[in-house]
Image: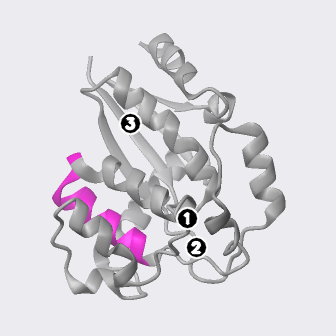
Amino acid sequence: MNLELFFIYDSQCPWSYATLPLVNEIKKAFPDTIVNTIHCAHYHGGDTIGMEKIKTIEQQASVKFSPEYLRQITQPKNSVISANVMAWLQLKQPDMALDVLNALQQTHFIDGNPLTSEEDFSEIVSQFKLSPANKLFKNKLTKEAEFVVEDLYEMQQHIGTSSFPAILLVIGEKAVLLDHSRYLNCPQDIVAAVKQEF
């Protein structure tokens, strides 16, 4: 049975960070799963993330936030460059997208890297031997990232929600929006939920 997963997220969203382990568990349990990472480009430099939200996530999910990240949570978040990089990667090297997303969220939520300049991405570019174009590092969505956001809008209308993060599972011709909130504290339990959908 063909299994495809669509993970709708923002790389700087702490709820997306808390949901990523579920995606990893599904991929680990079903290695042939095609994972589509869809960056919604929500943060454009205006929003901040409060300590209350972080405390709620830490109570409900299995993730932790580093002191380095917590020191900069009051600064406005901007995920435009990450959206550009991930849109480019999903187009050019989709098999690497999930690994790169894990690395991006590690460097942001654990190392405290703001991911707002080309220099902030240099370690990940080197680690994964990427060759991104300079246009990805401008503080403006590339055409590829804009297309992702447009396609996402259509998908959200189809699934009936604009909320993110979201995990949409496609098995053959059946599409199921998984209730990821039930598994944040114990990510491996989502595997049984996926098996029930077969």
Q: Between disc 3 and disc 1, whose residue precedes?
A: 3
Residue under the image location 48 percent in, 51 percent down: 8
Which SS type dominates the magenta stretch? Answer: helix
- The answer to whether 198 is drawn above or below residue 65 in the figure is above
Of callouts 1 and 2, the N-terminal one: 1
Q: Alpha-carbon neighbours of circle 3 within 10 Å: few (<14), some, or many (≥20)?
A: many
Residue sitting at 84 percent across and 59 percent down? Answer: 52
Q: Which of the two marks, 1 or 2, is nearer to us in this view?
A: 1
The tag on residue 5 is: 3
Question: Which residue occupies 38% across, 51% down?
Answer: 37
Q: How many marks?
A: 3
The magenta segment: 81-95
Per the image, the residue denoted by label 2 is 43
The numbered dot on residue 12 is: 1
CB of mark 1 within 8 Å of CB of mark 2? yes
* Among the 4 quarters of the image, the one containing residue 148: bottom left
Q: Amino acid at mark 2?
A: Tyr
Q: Which mark is residue 51?
A: none
Label 3 and label 2: CA atoms lie apart by 23 Å
